[in-house]
Image (tube, grey):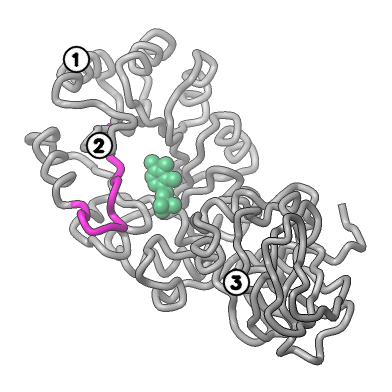
Amino acid sequence: MKTSRPIVVRISPTAILHNYRLAKRRAPDTKAFAVIKANAYGHGQWRAVEALRGEADGFAVLECENAVALREAGVTQPILLLEGLFSARDVRAVVEHRLTTAIHCQEQLELLLQHADPSAAVSLCLKLNTGMNRLGFTEKTLPAARAALQRLPNADITLMTHFAEADGERGVDWQLARFKSLAGDWAGRCCLANSAAILRHPQTHADWVRPGIMLYGASPFVDQSAADLGLQPAMTLQSAIIGIQEIGAGERVGYGGTFTAERAMRIGIIACGYADGYPRHAPSGTPLAVCGQRTTTVGRVSMDMMACDLSEIPEARIGSPVTLWGRGTAGDVPADEVASAAGTIAYELFCAVAPRVPVEVEAS
Ligand SMILES: *Cc1c(COP(=O)(O)O)cnc(C)c1O
């Protein structure tokens, strides 16, 4: 719903396409499943599909219903179900709509065998657990899976795994070693890398990669910024100043009075709160921009409003534009910086933007 309350989330399809192309340049000889789960990390599944449909080699989603909707909308590329099958209906949809499904446990494999014609040309990503310890077959459970797969002679199989620490110090080589040991003499296709592995670990690129967060212009790393990686922010959360208070030294701001002014200050009240998806745990000092100038939050974030310091921005008035994160009129406020101040990651900020925030799609 278009509202006159000044908050808006702006989505840039051009940035998503730019970031996808960057993933492809960093992993030049591989194909990429653009990961659009969780409503494209809060950017809108269809907006991401529209941005990428002419270029993405494939798409990755969670829900079979979403994959079918993509097919029905004319998406012809491979579509990967990242968590695989949940029901007999999913099996039938995978066959009928030529979806690619992860298979991560024997139960899923049995479900498939039970409801698919054994001669069907199903496309599978057999998921190996190489240390994430979330989903996938291990040394113990893989032999039974391999045996069961003999019963699907026309299955098209890719081996898949997921990295737990591609963004961190431990890296990926320990998981790659386990992958190679599990794969044995496997000469078929492999699909391993998330954004962090695409950007830092070229030895993981293999046949297919799965970029997620980088498509949306945030960094998977704590020690390297999105701008430094050449990524463009695809989401800008913007609002405006709706109130101004001149306060004296010793005055406190907001619920709980967690912020006390040490000197006279000019405080701006912004139409954005945790009910809009802004993190309530963002402490005083979290960055934002008013009139294009960087400043910080002050006091606790409340449901519909939050406060900021306007002491050094004398031109700020009621109605002045505020960038909570994303593209500013004079420089970006990286979502990664806001997330880090709030003790979370940009993934969570993006996914948390509330349905009540009107969306504007930037013209490409
Ligand atoms: C979400 C997800 C990705 C994308 O990860 P990013 O860190 O966002 O690049 C890749 N693979 C799997 C299995 C996922 O669930």
Residue type beneath disc 3 = Gly
- Residue 146, horizontal then vertical, whole percent: 19, 20
Q: Are marks 1 and 2 in contact (CB under 8 Å)?
A: no
In this view of the protein, which residue sits in the foreground, 75 or 297? 297
57 relative position to 335: left or right = left
Q: CA distance from mark 2 to mark 3?
A: 45 Å
**Magenta span contains residue 157:** yes
Position of 103 with respect to 287 (left or right) is left
Amino acid residing under circle 2: Leu
* 122 with respect to 346 (left or right): left
Q: Is residue 25 above or below residue 126?
A: below
The magenta span reads 156-172
Look at the picture and state if 289 lies above or below 83.
below
Q: Nearer the viewer, residue 245 or 134?
A: 245
Closer to the chain start, of discs 1 and 3, is 1
Q: How far across and how far down the image is residue 39, in percent? A: 61, 45
Q: Which residue is mark 1?
A: 144
Report the residue at 30% width, 26% height from top: 155
Q: Secondary structure at mark 2?
A: strand
Q: Residue at x 11, y 44 (%)?
A: 177
Q: Circle 2 sits on which residue?
A: 159
Q: Looking at the rendered structure, which numbered label has been put on residue 285?
A: 3
